[in-house]
Image (spheres, helix red, strand yellow):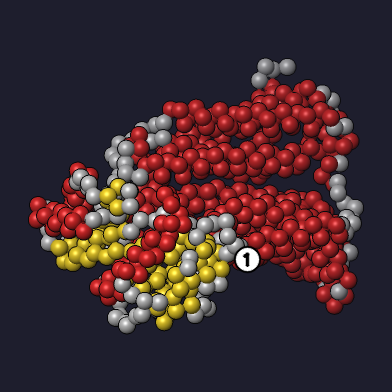
């Protein structure tokens, strides 16, 4: 026997099964390329030296882990499908005299060839596409584009090791499957599972309960921090519910359709429903996988697109002015000194000050129960963020003047309820004279992005503000909030905004504040400018968008491959059935109508279910986006609808392309 006999036999087998292996190899090349690209970008030295690189690297490391785990699961799952299609072939080899150890050698060389092409092709594609993907990432995050071309050696090694390990495990699994099976079992493997499955009502009930629990969590969870903790619980429940309902619930629904005589006794529906009932047991897992992957694509892309699209509104809330300086417990002398520093810095930078506004506020966290605000988080109620300001400062920053008594207040509810007529803040009673419909953007500050309910309360004067300050100081002690002095500037241009901020930061850092208030040293935070904030948020939100698109493509690639293999599997299983139907008198037109009816039911059911999952998850997604300051519900709804529309078009195109393969096999 020739020393290259098994290599030649392996090559010949792969050629004969190219319709099965070619999509598998292409997908494996794509996944290995994506893993290398993610590794190369994560540890790129040029990106590591850029501003915001730490946040971006944290996001990309997460992406590397997700791709590695998913590649292991998906390639192993796809390999099991290939083995199922080829067991009959291996059984025939065995019956014709080839021992199982010889089949094992042949399978070894098949794995070596497929793995070698996949790994080398993936690394080559990754090296070529890496620069293009880096340019896309830097474009999204609005970072500078570095010049040069580099190859990340450790990334090449890590990618090769990961995928070699995957192929080694799949080979061992395949050898075990062939070794334990008898030749007759191998020959009959493709016709197994023909008995009509029983309706498993317990599994159906488990699926319904799991999905109901996930939907309940998504719809009723109002606390963003709670949403973050419960998100993974909801994901697990959705996965369990989807698998249970596709496995057991789909059979129950098909049997109900069969009982509906008006629907069932039509040519197209009769053959499609009866055929699906018999094969749904073995097809349910594949359909559930398509549904879950589709849901993952929709959730990731719609969420990250919403976050990126709403970035400007978050920046406007966080940075209502071009430059902002925050200080705590300053003496009157230090307030004047800070203003003088701001003005002198403008002269040194040769930039004009369009406007300079200063105000004092007190931001305190408390637990709200009705109209009662109680200090301490061990109380029953809703954690709330209350910002107090005097009428004088409110008017100075654009608010409308109102006459207030010492026990009256104006209230702007950014997030929370507007049902109270009176507030009692730790013993300080206020009658709500009016709920404000809008609020000067310069006064929103941090309260506009906190995850708790936010209340802005305008009080009469500094005496009332001081009284509230002393109350919360007594309640919280060393953890009490400090009186905050905020200086906001608008410059005549943006070209020197960052230069001005850097120089002001240097002066503030060197400023010696010696005045004490209540035994606590005063301090001034580093000045911030809108352009620095924009750069920081561009990296953070752009990184999430890039990760969402990148992982979305990985999951979409997997979805396409599963759909393709399901079409092939359905085609081979239906070929004999439809030949019999033609022989007993069914016309070609009726056969095609039956095929179309079955394919539409099977392959669009996961898409419809994924859209239902997305609709149920939308409230939870909105809560999670609040953690990043994004609360524009209309923008979120638009992004979700556009994502669903684009994905549905792509899904339809994939369906039409793979359906052609099915028709060719059947006809």
Can I make out residue 140 in this image?
Answer: no
The secondary structure type at the circle numbered 1 is: helix
Question: In this view of the protein, which residue sits in the foreground, 141 or 399?
Answer: 399
Q: In which quarter of the view is residue 56 placed?
A: top left
271 to the left or right of 169: right
Question: In this view of the protein, which residue sits in the foreground, 447 or 230?
Answer: 447
Q: Residue under circle 1?
A: 219
Image spot of residue 642 (x, y percent): 50, 67
| Looking at the image, residue 407 lies above or below residue 382 | below
- Residue at 85% x, 57% y is 202
- Residue at 47% x, 30% y is 156
Crowd tier of the residue under label 1, counting other residues whose Cα lies within 10 Å: few below 14, some 14–19, many 20 or above:
some
Question: In this view of the protein, which residue sits in the foreground, 415 or 559?
Answer: 415
Image spot of residue 135 (x, y percent): 36, 46
Can I make out residue 515 in this image?
Answer: yes
- Residue at 52% x, 70% y is 372
Image spot of residue 307 (x, y percent): 45, 59
449 to the left or right of 295: left
| Looking at the image, residue 173 lies above or below residue 139 | above
| Looking at the image, residue 465 lies above or below residue 18 | below
Image spot of residue 45 (x, y percent): 35, 34
16 to the left or right of 623: right
Instruction: Report the quarter where the N terminus lies.
Output: top right
- Residue at 48% x, 65% y is 426
């Amino acid at each position: 026997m020739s020393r290259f006999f098994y290599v030649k036999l392996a090559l010949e087998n792969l050629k004969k099964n190219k319709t099965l292996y070619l999509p598998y190899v292409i997908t494996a090349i794509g996944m290995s390329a994506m893993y290398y690209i993610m590794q190369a970008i994560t540890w790129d030295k040029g990106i590591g030296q850029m501003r915001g690189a730490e946040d971006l690297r944290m996001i990309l490391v997460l992406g590397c882990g997700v791709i590695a785990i998913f590649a292991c699961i998906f390639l192993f799952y796809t390999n099991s499908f290939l083995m199922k299609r080829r067991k009959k072939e291996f059984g025939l080899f065995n019956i014709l005299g080839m021992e199982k150890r010889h089949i094992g050698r042949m399978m070894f060389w098949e794995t070596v060839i497929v793995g070698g092409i996949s790994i080398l092709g993936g690394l080559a594609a990754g090296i070529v596409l890496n620069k293009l993907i880096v340019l896309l990432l830097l474009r999204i995050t609005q970072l500078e584009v570095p010049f040069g071309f580099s190859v990340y050696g450790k990334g090449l090694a890590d990618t090769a090791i990961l995928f070699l390990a995957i192929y080694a495990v799949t080979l061992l699994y395949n050898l075990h499957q062939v070794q334990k099976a008898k030749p007759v079992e191998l020959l009959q493997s493709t016709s197994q599972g023909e008995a009509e499955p029983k309706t498993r009502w317990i599994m159906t009930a488990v699926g319904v309960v799991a999905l109901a629990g996930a939907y309940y969590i998504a719809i009723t969870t109002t606390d963003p921090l709670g949403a973050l903790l419960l998100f993974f619980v909801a994901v697990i429940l959705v996965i369990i519910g989807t698998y249970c309902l596709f496995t057991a619930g789909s059979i129950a629904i098909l049997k109900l359709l069969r009982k509906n005589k008006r629907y069932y006794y039509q040519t197209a529906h009769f053959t499609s429903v009866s055929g699906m009932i018999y094969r749904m047991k073995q097809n349910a897992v594949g359909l559930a996988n398509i549904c879950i992957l589709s849901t993952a694509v929709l959730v990731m892309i719609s969420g990250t697109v919403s976050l990126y699209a709403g970035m400007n509104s978050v920046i406007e809330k966080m940075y209502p002015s071009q430059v902002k300086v925050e200080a705590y417990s300053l003496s009157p002398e230090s307030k004047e000194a800070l203003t003088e520093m701001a003005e002198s810095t403008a002269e040194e930078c040769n930039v004009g000050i369009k406007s300079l506004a200063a105000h004092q506020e007190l931001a305190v966290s408390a637990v709200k129960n009705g109209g009662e605000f109680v200090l301490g988080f061990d109380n029953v109620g809703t954690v709330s963020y209350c910002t107090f300001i005097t009428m004088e400062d409110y008017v100075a920053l654009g608010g409308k003047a109102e006459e207030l008594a010492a026990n009256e207040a104006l209230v702007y509810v950014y997030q929370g309820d507007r049902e109270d007529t009176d507030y009692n803040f730790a013993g300080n009673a206020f009658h709500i004279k009016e709920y404000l419909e809008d609020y000067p953007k310069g006064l929103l500050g941090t309260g506009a992005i906190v995850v708790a309910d936010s209340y802005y309360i305008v009080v009469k004067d500094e005496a009332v503000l001081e009284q509230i300050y002393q109350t919360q100081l007594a309640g919280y002690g060393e953890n009490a909030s400090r009186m905050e002095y905020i200086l906001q500037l608008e410059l005549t241009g943006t070209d020197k905004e960052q230069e001005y901020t850097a120089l002001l930061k240097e002066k503030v850092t060197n400023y010696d504040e010696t005045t004490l208030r209540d035994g606590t040293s005063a301090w001034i935070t580093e000045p911030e400018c809108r352009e620095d904030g924009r750069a920081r948020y561009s990296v953070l939100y752009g990184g999430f968008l890039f990760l969402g698109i990148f992982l979305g493509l990985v999951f979409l690639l997997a979805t396409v491959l599963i759909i393709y293999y399901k079409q092939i599997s359905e085609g081979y299983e239906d070929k004999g059935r439809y030949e019999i139907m033609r022989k007993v008198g069914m016309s070609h037109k009726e056969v095609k109508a039956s095929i179309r009816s079955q394919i539409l039911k099977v392959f669009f059911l996961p898409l419809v279910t994924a859209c239902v999952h997305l609709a149920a998850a939308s409230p939870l997604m909105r809560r999670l986006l609040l953690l990043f300051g994004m609360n524009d519900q209309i923008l979120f709804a638009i992004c979700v609808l556009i994502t669903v529309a684009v994905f549905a078009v792509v899904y339809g195109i994939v369906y039409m392309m793979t359906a052609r393969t099915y028709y060719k096999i059947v006809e």
